[in-house]
Amino acid sequence: MPRMTINGRPVEFDLDPDMPLLFALREAANLTGTKNGGANFDDGGSTCECGACTVLVDGAALRSCRITLAEAEGRFITTIEGLSRDRSHPVQQAMVAEQAIQCGFCTPGIVMAAAGLLSRNPAPERSEIEEAIQNDCRCGVFPRLMSAIERAARVSQRQESISAAPAPAIDTKDAAEAVPALRVVPDPEGPGS
């Protein structure tokens, strides 16, 4: 049974060691921020080229569809969920500040690839960013994406700061106030029922 550390927690998978890490993360560990852009278990997951499944493996950005559980044995895996629970990582902050997010599907993989780059090279040149970020994004945000990663590098080096991005999620009561078509239904088991 493959053992590894995911987002700081030691885990053991009772799964086929030849299974791509992508499927173990999404299906067994319920870490669905790691996206599947088209890989399938039948071909070993290795035919996908998009990068949406990028995670950090011992600090290096790798596509989780291309590494098996056996290859991940004993390694430290960081997914988008483990990078920063409050979106405070400089790459996440810069992506929001530079409006480098459109549909969001590819965003976790891009953030992880950029975080891996900045951990090994805190001040990359534009050409180094372009070489490191090979993720597909069909929304066409690459110019803003490059600016966001350059900005994240400056933030990481404390040359610049960014106001915090909005906190993850929204309370349903707040959502109901902002969206007239949504209302909070009282819990039949809760107080006042």
Image (cartoon, grey):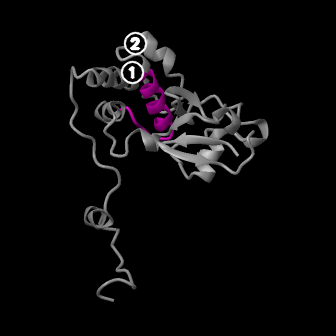
Q: Is residue 175 left or right of residue 8?
A: left
Label 1 sits on a secondary structure element that is: helix
Q: In which quadrant of the rendered image does the C terminus lie?
A: bottom left
Which class describes the residues within 10 Å of circle 1: few (<14), some (14-19), or many (20+)? many
Residue 26 drawn at (x, y percent):
59, 48
Q: Is residue 178 left or right of residue 12?
A: left
Question: Which residue does the numbered mark 1 point to in the structure image?
Answer: 146
Question: Is the residue 8 above or below the residue 170 in the image?
Answer: above
Which mark identifies residue 126? 2
Give me the residue at 35% from left, 32% from top: 95
In the image, the segment drawn in magenta is 100-119
Give the amino acid type for the residue marked by disc 2 in the picture: Arg
Residue 44 drawn at (x, y percent):
75, 36
Find residue 180 and report its image quarter: bottom left
Q: Earlier in the sequence, mark 1 or mark 2?
A: 2
73 and 123: which one is in front? 73
Give the amino acid type for the residue marked by disc 1 in the picture: Met
Residue 148 drawn at (x, y percent):
34, 26
Give me the residue at 35% from left, 83% from top: 190
Find residue 172 and report its image quarter: bottom left
- Residue 35 visible, this orientation: no
